Amino acid sequence: MGKRFALVAIRLMVSVNLLYAAIFAKFAGIPQSVALFTQMSQAVHGLIPQPVFRLGSGVFETTVAVLLLIPKTARLGARLVIVWMTAIILSHIFVLGYGVFLSPADAQAIPSRRTRKSGNDGCCTNAQKIVGRTDGSEATTS
């Protein structure tokens, strides 16, 4: 009985986490979410527009959360969570950079990809761009 309760509790926590991210970040269209998905859209050269990317991932997360809550489809939901989390981790490593998870001060301590700022000789990290720190005040020149 204890093992079954623990598994249901884990499924419930993962579902709530997915629903929270989908409802409050993706469907609501908060600026940070829009900025992240704009960067993701640019990574695929605009083939998938930002709203489609953002809302599509929200629909997928909502579907996976519901699948996890239904006992007969929980295994499929768990497999889809693994695939989805792998894709999210890889996109954060290769497209968004590490700074998305950190404050601007923490992002300075981690070496990440550098991108050129237009019209200036300085450069800034992806983390600085996402948190709005593109003024070059803390950026180094290369």
Image (cartoon, rainbow, N blue to C red):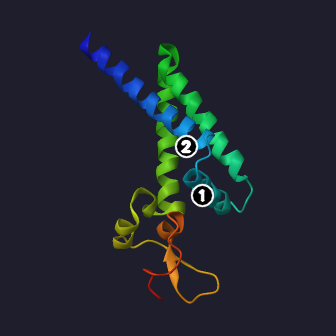
At horizontal 32% and vertical 14% (from top left) the residue drawn is: 4
Local crowd at mark 1 within 10 Å, few (<14), some, or many (≥20)? some
Between residues 40 and 25, which one lies in front from this camera angle? 25
Q: Position of residue 100 (x, y in %)?
A: 46, 59
Q: Work out whether residue 59 or residue 139 is closer to the camera in this orientation and state it.
A: 139
Say left or right for 18 vs 120. left
- Residue 46 horizontal/vertical position (percent): 73, 59
Name the residue rendered at 62%, 46% in the picture.
29
| Amino acid type at image mark 2 | Ala
Disc 1 and disc 2: Cα gap in Å? 11 Å
* Callout 1–callout 2 Cβ contact below 8 Å: no
* Residue designated by label 1: 35
Name the N-terminal-most of marks 1 and 2: 2
Tell me, for residue 69, which label it has, or none: none
Residue 134, relative to residue 63: is it above or below? Answer: below
Type of amino acid under label 1: Ala
Question: In percent of the image, x 52 and y 86: which residue is there?
Answer: 122
Q: Quadrant of the N terminus?
A: top left
Q: Residues within 10 Å of mark 2 (few under 14, many from 20)?
A: some
Camera-side residue of 67 and 133: 133
- Quadrant in which residue 3 is drawn: top left
User: Where 36 sits versus 65, above or below?
Assistant: below
Task: State the residue position of label 2.
Answer: 25
Give residue 88's position: percent from left, percent from top.
50, 48
